[in-house]
Image: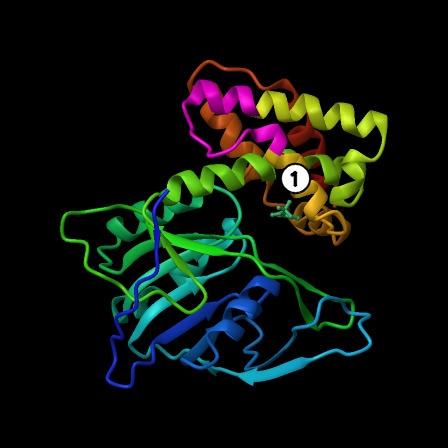
Amino acid sequence: MTQIDIHTPQSSTGRQRIVVAGVGALGTLMAWHCRSQTLFTHNRRQQTRFSLQTSASASDVTTTVDTFSAKPWQGEVVDWLIVTTKAAATIDILSDLKDRLNNTSRILLLQNGMGQQAEASAWLTQNKINAELWVGSSTEGAYRADNGTVIYAGKGQTLAGRWQHSTEDREAQLPPAMQLTTDIKQVLHEKLAINAIINPLTAHHGCRNGELLASEEKRRDFKALSAEVASLFHNLNWKTGFDITQQATKVAEATAQNQSSTLQDVLHQRPTELPYICGYLLKHAQQHGLSAPLTEQLYQSISAREAAW
Ligand code: KPL
């Protein structure tokens, strides 16, 4: 996969004008990376002051907390609108911001899951909005601690690329701390494969990522679901640059102490992103006459729990 860093300042100050919409843990981290640009945010609570703890854990003795601010976006002309909300909220947020999108050069969706990108692309066309759609995927680790502080727990990589390519693609300066990929769909598929294994299993067992490998029973489930996801990817001809079972094992080990985003949603009784992970996979499996019984069973049982909240 090609990854190139491109830097062509667009404004006379060399600073980009960036809006971060959605200020959960990842959104706050992205805003922090963009704090030296002209930064705006859009969030329901109208929050304008943010703090991010850059040391590894909430309990570190020597903690470093960076505080920074961002203006609420009133529709000023911007280079980037970075959307970090849950996948399910994408069309709602674009609709809320519809009047401002013609002042926006590029929209970057930086979320878990798949399906929302194609929905957003169709919505932009339908609404005759010319902003260019970009999509990103991040392995940066951030979470909100019980006291509300966002902790930057693990340095990762954020890749971004155009959703659709054309012969007229011009060079673009990416937001800070992002790298260009020319094949964002493969990157999204790779993330989807890992999320389709770790997320439903951790929610089902109510365990941290690393615990999936710690007992005989969970290891068996992990292996069986990994094999099912790998077989689906093979039959759907979705390429990954790694062996799916090996990579899922590596990620579970590397993020052993994490509560997956789906487990956190379940624990807080929030809607999960599984419709954009398992649901997306099942939809494509069905369209190709493929079955995925383990994915289906996990998806149904977690959805039934969600429906009872
Ligand atoms: O992306 C994740 C998530 O929790 O959504 C993983 C990779 C599973 C890390 O926790």
Reply above or below: 297 against 114. Answer: above
The residue lying toward the viewer, choosing from 246 and 307, is 246
Task: Tell which residue pokes out farthest to the left in this image.
Answer: 168
Give the residue type at disc 1.
Lys
- Report whether 240 appears left or right of 295: left
Q: Quadrant of residue 106?
A: bottom left
Of residue 203 and residue 256, the one placed in the foreground of this image is 256
Q: Quadrant of the N terminus?
A: top left
Mark 1 secondary-structure assignment: helix
Which of the 4 image quadrants contains residue 74? Answer: bottom left
Q: Is residue 164 left or right of residue 253?
A: left
Residue at x-position 43% and y-position 79%: 39
- x and y percentages locating residue 184 in the rendered image: 38, 45
The part of the chain drawn in magenta is 230-246
| Callout 1 crowding tier (Cα within 10 Å): few <14, some 14–19, many ≥20 | few
The x and y percentages for residue 210 are: 76, 42
Residue 108's spot in the image, x, y percent? 38, 58
Q: Is residue 243 magenta?
A: yes
Q: Which residue is mark 1?
A: 250
Residue 97's image quarter?
bottom left
Queried whether the magenta region covers residue 64, the answer comes back as: no
Give the side of residue 18 with respect to residue 269, left or right: left
| Residue closest to the eye, 229 or 71 | 229
> Which residue appears at 40% of the width and 80% of the height?
37
Question: In the rendered view, would you say 231 is above or below 206?
Answer: above
Q: Position of residue 285 (x, y in %)?
A: 48, 21
Seen at 63% across and 26% down, the residue is 226
